[in-house]
Image (cartoon, grey):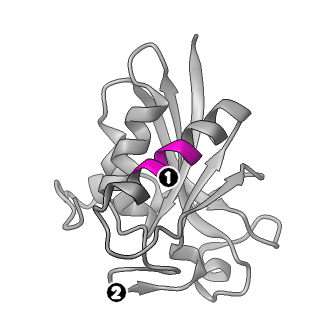
């Protein structure tokens, strides 16, 4: 038991980071890009839609204080996992719903969580969230890190 990593894509990474940043047990967050075809993409590359990277938040957390299951609960709550490549007005593969897992336990937990939510009837449509082995994480440019905090925005409209 110690520090672990998790990574989630659920639309614009500024909002996703804000949802996780102040959770008790979350040590740090970083926004960036995962799951694409280009090495070291820039924000402009990802926004152009040609790299297939997702905007993500990578989280370092203390599993003694917050569980992966609790992080998944936040993930499901902050976005609509039934809309492929779209969250609100943001459209494109970079905004897809995706869970990047770092080990087999995370993979199994994510699959069970998705199946349970799908069966719950909370959503009328099928959940389209991808569950994918974590590839290399490319940290986004510094001005994107803790963006909403830097701008003095206390609450995001999606959660």
Q: Quadrant of residue 42?
A: bottom right
- Front residue of 18/151: it is 18
Vertical placement of residue 134 versus 156, above or below: above
Q: Nearer the viewer, mark 2 or mark 1?
A: 1
All told, the count of numbered labels is: 2
Q: Is residue 113 magenta?
A: yes
Q: Quadrant of residue 66?
A: top left
Residue 103 visible somewhere in the drawing: no
Mark closer to the chain start, 2 or 1:
2
The prevailing secondary structure element of the residues shown in magenta is helix
Q: CA distance from mark 2 to mark 1?
A: 27 Å
User: Residue 158: percent from the left, percent from the top?
Assistant: 24, 66
The quarter in which the C terminus is drawn is bottom left
Q: Quadrant of residue 55?
A: bottom right
Question: Which mark, by number, is residue 126?
Answer: none
- Front residue of 126/81: it is 126
Residue drawn at (63%, 38%) of the image: 108
- Residue wearing tag 2: 89
Circle 1 crowding by C-alpha within 10 Å: few under 14, some 14–19, many from 20: few
Residue drawn at (26%, 61%) of the image: 151
Of helix, strand and loop, which one carries label 2?
Answer: loop
Residue drawn at (52%, 60%) of the image: 9
Magenta stretch: give its range: 111-116
- Residue wearing tag 1: 115
Vertical placement of residue 59 versus 42, above or below: above
- Front residue of 135/117: it is 117
User: Residue 90: percent from the left, percent from the top?
Assistant: 41, 83
The quarter in which the N terminus is drawn is top right
Residue 44 visible somewhere in the drawing: yes
- Front residue of 87/105: it is 105
């Amino acid at each position: 038991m110690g520090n672990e990593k998790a990574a989630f894509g659920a639309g614009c990474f500024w909002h996703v980071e804000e949802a996780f940043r102040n959770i008790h047990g979350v040590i740090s967050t970083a926004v960036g890009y995962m799951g694409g075809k280009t090495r070291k993409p820039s924000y402009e590359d990802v926004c152009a839609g040609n790299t297939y990277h997702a905007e993500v938040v990578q989280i370092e957390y203390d599993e003694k204080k917050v569980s992966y299951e609790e992080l998944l609960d936040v993930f499901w709550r902050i976005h609509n996992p039934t809309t492929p490549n779209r969250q609100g007005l943001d459209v494109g593969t970079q905004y897809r719903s995706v869970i990047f897992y770092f080990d087999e336990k995370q993979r199994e937990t994510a699959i069970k969580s998705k199946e349970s939510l799908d069966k719950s009837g909370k959503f009328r449509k099928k959940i389209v969230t991808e569950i994918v082995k974590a590839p290399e994480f490319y940290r986004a440019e510094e001005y994107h890190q803790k963006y909403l905090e830097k701008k003095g925005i206390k609450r995001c409209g999606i959660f």
